[in-house]
Amino acid sequence: MSTARPAPPTAVRGAAVPGGRLEGVDVARALALLGMMAAHVGGIADQVEWSDPGTWAAVANGRPSSLFAVLAGVSIGLTSGRSTPPGPPEIGRIRGRLAVRAAVVIALGLLLMALQTPVYVILPTYGALFLLVIPVLRVRARWLLVLAGGCAVVSPVAALAVVPLYGDAGLWEAQLGLVYPVVTFLAYVLVGLAVARGGLGARRVQVGLLAVGAVVAAAAYAVGNTLAPVPVDAAKAFPGLPFAGEGSTPSEAVAQLFLSPRDHSSSIVDVVGTAGVAVAVIALCTLVFDGRGRTLRRVAFPLAATGSMPLSVYAGHIVVLALLPGFPDSGVAWWCFAVGSVLSAMTWRTFLGRGPLERLTARLTRLVPDVR
């Protein structure tokens, strides 16, 4: 998550200053937040039908949460040394502070779950993922991608394997590792950490990531739609779990398990495709908005302000939903939440800087002493 508001990066021979803030990352994070709001209150379709423009908003199913998780990995990487993470004893302080941050995020997530809104709260899984990446903070980018690939391969099996543990679980329990499977989302965080370790601030890296992310996503969805087209009764599927339609043959069921392009299916295609989309979005945002002059920074400010305080914005929209029970899902509702969130974030950042929950988290992480 973003915290302080240092001066924006400047351009030096086509690359952002190594220690400067990447405003494009905040913009991408804002897109993830607004996309999740669309999934929560926008009344969007279950699946995209490219022949029907009325369903196109369904791209907000699954992809914003995966973008949010990839950005978690990017954020961890940027705050733990970027392309060159430090060794002992400094890395110990970073790990300690990341553990405190994880505890805060988990606690906040449980509090938001207690509000009993119809939203599947991602924060408890999000915080658990912070803890899981602590041991790999010094691993090279290529090996992080290997680990992410391993998670993607076992993702559908792991998602199904935990189902018996939930039995007749209600909404509360389902939010703890079922809707957002830990192995699936660990793949996203590892990809984001690898992106940060690869030098995201460099212009050539941004161009490369944009191309690779787009090609990987397109290839994954092409394979999935060819070999395992989404079943017509996919609306019955539970989010986060693989699903085979009624009357599927064993081979069709296996194809759906591993290759389904359905959003939130936890299949290999779903993980690889959504990760590719997330990487492309992050690369595009940093390419457009970082090191490009004051005018573009002003254009980016509304979204950058929103993305600089993701905990506060995410928690805020759930609190509002709790205060307005029965709020109807619609495009108008999404616009109300989106505009309200952006205006609130802009005002807060202009006059008070760091978001309120980000400020609290920073204070708690400083309980881990600096290395002397």
Image (cartoon, rainbow, N blue to C red):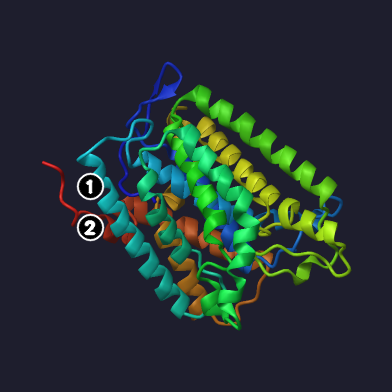
Q: Residue at x 83, y 48 (%)?
A: 227
Identify the amino acid type marked 1: Arg
How far across and how far down the image is residue 312, in percent? Answer: 40, 61
Label 2: element kind? helix
Residue 298 visible in image: no
How far across and how far down the image is residue 308, in percent? Answer: 40, 49
How far across and how far down the image is residue 19, in percent? Answer: 32, 31
For the residues labelled 1 and 2, say whether their Cβ atoms are less than 8 Å apart. no
Q: CA distance from mark 1 to mark 2?
A: 14 Å
How far across and how far down the image is residue 200, in percent? Answer: 46, 32
Q: Residue at x 33, y 42 (%)?
A: 79
Q: Give 37 or 73, whichever is nearer the viewer.
A: 73
Q: Provide the residue designation for mark 1.
A: 93
* Vertical position of residue 195 compared to residue 70: above or below: above
Tell me, for residue 363, which label it has, or none: 2
Q: Give 245 or 100, whichever is nearer the viewer.
A: 245
Q: Going by the image, does 156 lie left or right of 119? A: right
Q: Give 292 or 57, whichever is nearer the viewer.
A: 57
Q: Going by the image, does 134 lie left or right of 69? A: left
Q: Residue at x 42, y 37 (%)?
A: 22
The mark that comes first in sequence, 1 or 2, is 1
Label 1: element kind? helix
In the image, which is nearer the foreground, mark 1 or mark 2? Answer: 1
| Residue ranking furthest to the front | 250
> From the image, which quarter does the C terminus lie in?
top left
Tell me, for residue 241, which label it has, or none: none
Badge 2, how many Cα within 10 Å: few under 14, some, many 20+? few
Identify the amino acid type marked 2: Arg
Q: Going by the image, does 68 lie left or right of 78? A: right
| Residue ranking furthest to the top | 13
